[in-house]
Amino acid sequence: MIPETPRKPLILIAEDDRDLGRLLVFSLQRREYRALLATDGRAALNAAFEHKPDLILLDLMMPILHGYEVCRLLKSSPVLAYIPVIILTALVTTENKVKGFKLGADDYLTKPFAMPELLARINAILSRRKRRNAPVEFADL
Amino acid sequence: MKLTLPWRWFFGVAVLLTALLLSVNVCLDLALPPFLVQKIRTGLERDAFITRELFVSQLSATQPDSEEINRLAHALAAKTGLRITVIAADGTVLGESDKPATELHTIENHLKRPEVQQAIDTGVGVDTRHSATIGVDLMYVAVSVKKKDGVAGFVRVALPLHEIAQTSSHVRRIVAWASIAVGCVCIPFVFWLAGRTSRPILQMCRVAERVAHGDFSKSVSTRVGGELGELAAALNDMSTQLEARLQDLNRERSDLDAILGNMTEGVLVTDPAGRIRLINNALRRQHDVGDEVVGKTVIEAFRNAELQDLVANVARQNNVPPQELIFFGPAERVFEVNAATLRAPDGNCAGVVLVFHDITRLKRLENVRKEFVANVSHELRTPLSVIKGYIEALLDEQPPTPEMTKQFLETIEKNSRRLEALINDLLTISALESQQAWLDFKPVNPRAAAQAAVEELATQAARKSITMALEIPPEVPLASADGERLHQVFLNLLDNAIKYTQDGGQVVISARENAGEIEVCVADNGPGIGAEHLPRIFERFYRVDKARSRELGGTGLGLSIVKHIVQAHGGRVWAESSTRSERGEPGVGSRFFFTLPRA
């Protein structure tokens, strides 16, 4: 983790393929995000509890704990449920997607993916979050 | 006393005969006396005329001789039995056969007697009176004797009518006796006739009773003629037909039983109330139930709410699509259940029939397939995703540094190779599984095949300082195998051994003959494989340590390919191993065995 000003959003990457994990960390850091890589499900949960990231990129086929389980546990934890989760996976069937959303994922992206698209989605979710948390401003119509 | 047919007939005939007798008697009583009277009258009239002739001369004389007349009357009466009275024209009785001559003059004047009066008018007079003199009814017939200018006198004959009563009662008696005689002949005859009718009927009853109880052996004798004979013939025919129908039904029934008993699908039939009516053997086996479920409702017997719902739905809707139902038990099983309603002839629901197909295995295979597809998809997409991602990074407007570029390109190359290996293995597996792989069986020397693989992997082994030893004695016979495929088997096993053994480790390839097969063993002294993994390591994409496997460049299909090839040769493959934790000593490694047929 690259220590930066606390304002930069922290993104937890749960991905067991090291090459892809490294790429994601690299790309995110380039875009002024902080990135954290966990290479199995349990490590991902622990990292989430410990660091309270602003967003989680979740792979599904991970050792020790499957991505679905991680998602379920995240979304049923009162502490962590607020964290947006984007599932990033090679499981592409409709069944998989529906299950992901049912378990509480905020978005579902399939591999191979276009990095610009992933970055755009991350940005969209984080902006929405920011807007929601911002104070309401009154103005004349 | 039972009112059987003979007795009924007897009473009927008795009543008939009695009625007949009575009416005959009445008729006789009514008709006979007048008839007899008439007959007597006619006879008496005749007698009168005849008698008159005898007295004409006497009466016509100017001075009839009363004595003579009386004497004649007596004589005639004695001969004929008639009562004869001769009367003068003035009514004086000149002769009376019923009275002695001495009393003749005491007899009163007869002129006023009705018959005499009539005789005056018409010449003949008839009257019937009760005679005080002799105390019976008498019929008098008087005829007048004519003379020139009037009547000379009258001759009167009379007969007592007690004969009529006598004759009547005599006739009556004859009729009565005749009736009794006829009756006596008739009664046995009636009984016999009735018996002739009732016996066949009784026989038919008994035969019908037997038929009703399923015994078709007896038939009715058709010796009786007429309607009863027709009935007997019809009954016999009906019995034959029934027997034939019953045999047909039984045959159909046993066909149905045979079909139901031998089919592999379970069949269950309920009655309209939803209670189980019938189950077949397959269903008993499938759900481990017996006859105790007959009569229970579906939910009582199977405790499956979905099944109960299905039964309820199909009863309403008549046609529902087949449903997959899961049954929990000692083992979880999946059945495809087809349901349909049975319709009674009047259109109402007569029950529901359920057919259970055990698709547990099918489902399992389907799941395995699905899992495999998901795995393949994942395994292909992941390296592809890496390649794409790194290329995107390279083409980015913010290009990476030269060192990073080099790193990126190396990663791309590595993942390309990974893809290549995976695609090759997948194609191999695909060919082997679809049995399109054509195996070229030839006598192959196992030692030579092992040697070739060892040489091919020498560099890799050397990199980790792993020694590979061949311990195949020369007397091990040739195996019948496809050389290329056998090479692949050795390559895969050796490659694994090298990958998963520590530096400086040892790999030993040995072989021996065992019960007509060649048994080969590839053993290493690496960390070994845990017992929980051993049964599964030959599965496609099964890895004990996924991350490590991928790092080492494994596709996850190597052992699966080995298994397929060996099995395609008719051999077996298995692994033995123990990990450090089990034996409490440094890992004793893994031993992979496979067998091949002798050449």
Image (cartoon, coloured by chain):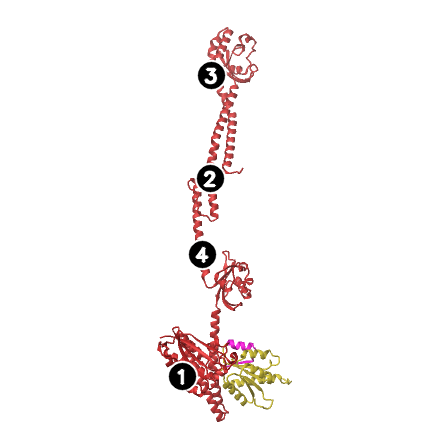
User: Disc 3 or 4, which lies upstream in sequence?
Assistant: 3
Q: Position of residue A116 (x, y in %)?
A: 51, 86
Q: Secondary structure at mark 3?
A: helix
Q: Position of residue B176 (x, y in %)?
A: 50, 26
Determine the CA span between mark 4 and mark 2. Answer: 40 Å
Label 2 resides on the chain identified as B
Residue highlighted by disc 4? B254
Q: Secondary structure beneath disc 2?
A: helix
Q: Colour of chain A?
A: yellow
Q: Quadrant of the N terminus of chain B?
A: top right
Mark 2 or mark 1, which has the lower sequence index?
2
Alpha carbon separation for disc pair 2 and 1: 107 Å
Q: Earlier in the sequence, mark 4 or mark 2?
A: 2
Please state which amino acid type lies under the numbered disc 2. Arg
Q: Which residues are magenta?
A: A94-110
1 or 3: tag closer to the N-terminus: 3
Q: Residue at x 53, y 12 (%)?
A: B98
- Chain B: colour as depicted: red
Who's the residue at 48% across and 19% down the image?
B42
Q: Residue B335, percent across and down?
A: 50, 67
**Residues at discs 1 and 4 in contact (Cβ within 8 Å):** no
Q: Nearer the viewer, residue B326 or B492?
A: B492
Point 48% across, 90% down: residue = B407
| CB within 8 Å, label 1 to label 3 | no
Mark 1 — residue?
B454
Query: Residue A101 colored magenta?
Result: yes
Q: Nearer the viewer, mark 2 or mark 1?
A: 1
Circle 3 sits on which residue?
B46
Residue B207: x and y in percent read: 46, 45
